Image (cartoon, rainbow, N blue to C red):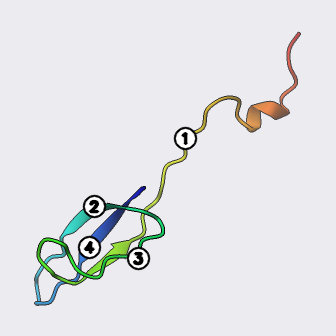
Amino acid sequence: MATYLYETIPQKPRQKPRQFEVVQKMSDPPLERCPETGEPVRRLITGGSIITRGTSILSMNKPRRR
C-alpha cells in the first residue's frame, strides 16, 4: 500500500487548494473527487525517500585495510 498526496482543484477565484493524503494500492485508479467534500482533485507527484541498509555501493570500491 502506498500513500498518495492529492490536492483539490479550486472552482472559485482566490480559493486555495487543500491537500490531503490517501492510502491506496498502486493498482487502484487515482481519485477524481475528494471523499469528504466531492470537490475535483488531482494526484500530486512527490519525491520518495530511499532507505539503504548494509554496505553501500560506494564503499565496495575501496580496498580493504589488512
- According to the picture, the residue beneath numbered tag 2 turns out to be 21
Q: Secondary structure at mark 2?
A: strand
For the residues labelled 1 and 4, the Cα–Cα distance comes to 27 Å
The residue lying at 23 percent from left, 80 percent from top is 33
Specify which label sits upstream in the sequence, 4 or 2.
Answer: 4
Q: Quadrant of residue 56?
A: top right
CB within 8 Å, label 3 to label 4: no
Q: Earlier in the sequence, mark 3 or mark 1?
A: 3
- Inter-mark Cα distance, 4 to 2: 9 Å
Is residue 15 or residue 19 the one in the foreground? 19
User: Quick check: 54 left or right of 40?
Assistant: right
Q: Residue at x 89, y 9 (%)?
A: 66
Q: Which residue is mark 4?
A: 7
Residue named by callout 3: 29
Task: Check disc 1 and give the amino acid type.
Answer: Ile
* Residue 28 x, y percent position in the rendering: 42, 71
Q: Tell me: residue 39, above or below residue 35.
A: below
Helix, strand or loop at label 1? It is: loop
Of badges 3 and 4, nearer the viewer stands: 3
Which three-letter amino acid code belongs to the residue tagged 2?
Answer: Glu
Residue furthest out toward the bottom = 12
Label 1 or label 2, whichever lies nearer to me, is 2
Q: Earlier in the sequence, mark 1 or mark 2?
A: 2
Q: CA distance from mark 3 to mark 1?
A: 27 Å
Report the residue marked by disc 1: 51
Q: Position of residue 37 (x, y in %)?
A: 11, 76
